[in-house]
Image (cartoon, grey):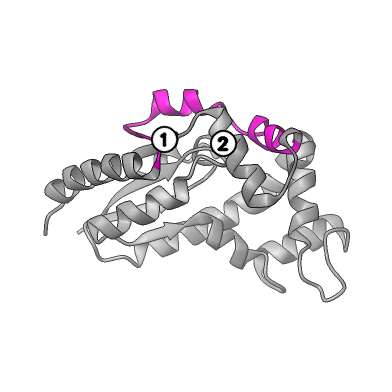
Amino acid sequence: MTPFLLGVTGGIGSGKSCVSRLLASYCLAPLVDVDQCCRRLLEIDQPGWLALRAAFGDVFLQANGAVDRTALRERLFSEPQFRCQVDRLLHPLAREAMRRAAASCQESLVLIEIPLLYEAGWQSEVDAVLVVYARRGAQCCRIMRRDGVSRRKAAQAIAAQMNLGDKAEMADYVIDNSDSWACVRQRVVGLGNELSERFAG
């Protein structure tokens, strides 16, 4: 049986990882994390690492050969043209890794966390989309707390992505993660009940 693929996306600092992990656990569904796929692709001698080195030499490599992820991330957020260039290198590799991971799952429902689902145009890869929404102020505070950056840097990271409200309008499901975790948990459980009933067995 072909599994139903639910793509989970949002914006930086929207809390999509927390929501996707809880929802997957509640539904007893496997979770494919595209960010994790990308991290593995950027390990030394892996396809993404090789592609970056071929395109940019040692610019983003540390002395031990590992990718300097902080330097790479800062340039991705500050230079749209560079971001497009890197996306062209890495997106096909990440897409193939995601497909392989999803194909290995035997369950009827599979969650796939894809941070840049709409930006990359990967809607056709999934059967439905859940957007984890958060107000811009909440996003900023989470990014600042998590990454130890200034409000300006946090706002820059948010601006580098598609407007979160626009994503929510296109989604099949939306979870608002602007409020307390207790409130958000109730929303996730409600959606989990709906999905569990639909895909029971």
Against 168, residue 196 (above or below) is below
Question: What kind of residue is marked 2?
Answer: Gln
Q: Position of residue 126 (x, y in %)?
A: 37, 44
187 horizontally vs 119: left or right:
left
Q: Position of residue 15 (x, y in %)?
A: 48, 45
Question: Is residue 2 among the parts visible in the rendering?
Answer: no
Report the residue at 23% width, 47% height from top: 192
Question: Is residue 58 among the parts visible in the rendering?
Answer: yes
Q: Secondary structure at mark 2?
A: helix
Count of numbered labels shown in the rendering: 2
Mark 1–mark 2 distance (CA, rounded to whole Å): 11 Å
The residue pinned by badge 1 equals 179
Against 3, residue 117 (above or below) is above
Identify the disc placed on residue 139: 2
Q: Is residue 155 magenta?
A: yes
Report the residue at 40% width, 23% height from top: 169
**Magenta region: which residues?**
153-180
